[in-house]
Image: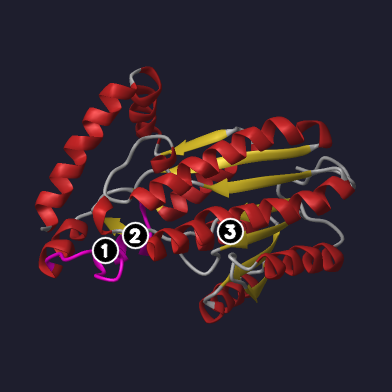
Amino acid sequence: METGENGLRTYSNGVAIVTGGASGIGKALGEELASRGCEVVLADLNIDDAAAVAEKINAEGGRATAEPLDVSDADAVASLVQNTWERCGRLDYMFNNAGIALNGRFEDFEISHWRKVVEINLMGVVHGVKWAETVMSKQGFGHIVNTASFAGLFPWPTTIPYTATKYAVVGLSTAMRAELADAGIRVSVLCPGTILTPMIENGASSERWVGSYSQEKLDALFQNARGMDVDTFAEKALDRIAKNESVIVLPSAYKLLWNINRLSPPLAIGLSRKIRNAILKRVS
């Protein structure tokens, strides 16, 4: 469906940028967007994998390109958005999806860990929304979609820098949604629960865990991880983005814990404490 030559296209003949598009949720979103007729720009530090995804999309009849991008580099994000807009003549969707996670006890996180997570998870989104708004305000339409996490709606433990940045992305997105509505710009925020992506598969990596942990126990923790298939997530997410939903929680079962946090923060904190103790017991 199209809303007209000069309006947002959902999704046929639209143009979308997806950061973190080489793998995981970004890859799945890019492939699903392309299957629905959208031209996709897959932006990622891992340009080789992003190029492979773009090649696959094009071979299947879609339209995709791959671009190298460090989302923590404001000038690089600005150039990507501006160049895409000039080349395609429009930008319907900006998916600020790139992100990283670090796990461990709060006391083991150094300032360097905090800076890395903030620069990618928060400032990477800030850079994306800043430059997307610039071109979307000129054309009079667009949809910005930021990937936060269920950890942006519930006080998830053992990954405090990640949780902090995801709470920030939710607040940024909902406030922007109110502020940019009159400019014709939509804003949604994705809050995935457990989605079966390389982030889950690599959750046992010692590089992801700050502090001293048993590698054998880390492997066991993530070996039987259960969650939503990433392609199913992308399909459901795009359906709900098309409906212009504000906060999108998938799988839907995670709404229960979100509601607990909204209705009774002390109860949510108590649950978070139990989750922390259970996780650390399993990996220590």
What residue is pinned by disc 1?
210
Mark on residue 221? none
Q: Quadrant of residue 112?
A: bottom left
Q: Which residue is mark 3?
A: 124
Residue 194 magenta-drawn? no
Which residue occupies 11% across, 68% down? Answer: 216
Q: CA distance from mark 2 to mark 1?
A: 7 Å
Seen in the picture, residue 199 relative to 175 is either above or below; the reply is below
- As drawn, 66 above or below 157: below
Disc 3: CA contacts within 10 A as few (<14), some (14-19) or many (>=20): many
Residue depicted at x 17% and y 36%? 274
Specify whether residue 200 is in view: yes
Left or right placement of residue 230 versus residue 95 in this view: left
Q: Is 162 left or right of 86, judged from the image as shown?
A: left
Q: Where is mark 2, residue-wise?
A: 102
First in sequence, mark 3 or 2: give its number: 2
Helix or strand or loop: what does disc 1 sit on?
Answer: strand
In the image, taking residue 254 as reference, residue 11 lies left or right, namely: right
User: Mark 2 near mark 1, Cβ–Cβ under 8 Å?
Assistant: yes
Is residue 118 or residue 272 the one in the foreground? 118
Report helix, strand or loop for mark 3.
Answer: helix
Q: Quadrant of the C terminus?
A: bottom left
Please name the amino acid that badge 1 sits on: Val
The region drawn magenta spans 195-214
Based on the picture, tell me whether residue 213 belongs to the magenta stretch. Answer: yes
Figure quadrant of the N terminus: top right
Residue type at mark 3: give it: Gly
Q: Is residue 24 visible?
A: no
Label 2 environment density (alpha carbons within 10 Å; few <14, some 14–19, many ≥20): many
Q: Position of residue 217 (x, y in %)?
A: 11, 62
Give the CA separation, mark 3 to mark 1: 22 Å
